[in-house]
Each structure stands twice: as structure tokens, then as C-alpha cells.
Image (cartoon, rainbow, N blue to C red):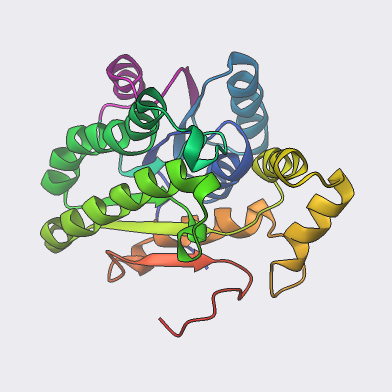
Amino acid sequence: MDLGISGRRAILLGSSRGLGRACAESLAREGVDLVINGRTASDVDEAVASIAASHQVSVRGVVGDSSTPEVHDALLAACEQPDIVLLNGEGPSPTPFSGLTDEMWQSALRQSLLGPLAFVQRVLPGMVERRFGRVVAISSAMVKSPNSVMSLSHGSRLGLTGVLKGISKDVVKHNVTINQILPERFDTARQEQMARAAMKFRGISYEQARADQIASIKAGRLGEARELGDAFAFLCSVQAGYISGQSLQMDGGSYEGVF
């Protein structure tokens, strides 16, 4: 299927590795010019070089914390008028609720709520004016069954989901859509981190922690990053112009509810 977005421009926050990188790969395959972002220069450089070598698109890299105004400036200097924006970033470290501090809450809110919303404020007016825009945030499906160890991530990301839902109602009439992808367990470095955390908190082996991750998914496997990347690309397509304000749960069929 031709997604109708060849020649469009995308800024992808948190896209140098993992699920964000998969999103970049899927857009590049559709002919979208990219700005890749990540905190580590070597990761960004490798992603830019690899994608540019594999696809006939423009790929630029911006290194830094995407929740900061300085990096927002650099991203928009690399692409002044993006048609597509991915809101993604590394989640806060798993921490028991009893051990959380005010500083940790402030950091999580800046990283996963305030920073992404500040960037959306800057790009939405241009999208509305041009009458085309696709904003997709990668959030967390695990909010369906939260636990205290992940309360930092759940709190800030649920806030982002709620605010973006409200904004989506105002801009969809301008062909600007805002959606969420809620991944459960995908086989990325994040699940490696979560397995290490489980070893510490539960006193189990690495092999048991990984087996427990797989057992928690009805599909009997972890998701593949490319599966999420392709779903993201579809939400950015011209065919998805009537889908907005939605949360696409990608969890291998694990959620028990109907809605």
C-alpha cells in the first residue's frame, strides 16, 4: 500500500534506537525525509548513516535531550516545518513508590509530559496552516494494570495522553491528527532494563525475568520493533486521516477488557 506520504518531512523524538528507530525505518521506506534524535551521539550518527544508506531520503541528526527548549530549537532548525512528529523518549527508571522524591517526579514530568507538550505547541500552528499534520506519541500500555514500581512512568505518560486527546479534538478539522501507540512488551533495550529491575526487586534470575515477560503476553512472545514502526507509519498516512484522538494498544492481545 502506498501511504501517500513520500516527500513529507518528519521530526522523530527519541528515534536513534529501539521503537523510535523502528518508526524512523518505516517512514524512510515510505520516502519521508527525517530528523533523527537521541541523547547519544554515536547512536544518532549510526542511525543517520544506516537509514541514509538504505533509503533515498534526507536524514539529519540532532543529539540531545528532546524535552529541553535548546534541543527543540535545534530540531526545528533542522526541519522548520515538519509534517509528522513522533513523541518518544526513554522512560524513567523503575523505582518503588516509597522511594520516590520530589526531584524524581519533577524530572519525569519534564521528560514525559511538559517537554513533549512544549514541542507540540511549536509545531501545531504550521500543521494547521498547511492542513496536514500527524502527531503520534509512544506511551505506555501498562497503565491498564499499573504497579507502584512504575508509578513515575504511568503518572507522566497518562497526563500526556489526556492532554493530547483534548488537543486532537480542536485540530482534526484541519487534517491534523493526534494519536497514541501504547506498546506492552517489545523486544528492545527497555525490556532488558525491566528484566534487570525484576532481578533486583524480586530476587530472581535473568532467565526467569525474561521468561516472565514472555508469559505475561497472550501472544506468547515479545513484540518486534518493526511491527510498531509499521503501525506508526500507517497512522501517519493519508489513509489514516479519519483516525484521531485514539490509543492503539499493541500488546499481543493481552488486555482483558473489551474497550
In percent of width and height, residue 151 lies at: 45, 46
Rendering quarter of residue 116: top left
What residue is drawn where x is 26% and y is 58%?
177
In percent of width and height, residue 98 lies at: 48, 38
In percent of width and height, residue 146 lies at: 49, 58
Q: From which residue to which does the magenta span run?
A: 60-80
Is residue 63 placed above or below 164 in the rendered structure?
Answer: above
- Name the quadrant of the C terminus: bottom left
Residue 85 colored magenta? no
Judge by depth and name the residue closer to the eye, 43 or 118.
118
The single residue placed furthest to the bottom in the displayed view is 258
Q: Is residue 8 visible?
A: no
Rendering quarter of residue 216: bottom right
Residue 70 colored magenta? yes
Residue 120 relative to residue 256: left or right? left
Is residue 244 placed above or below 24 in the rendered structure?
Answer: below
In percent of width and height, residue 51 lies at: 62, 34
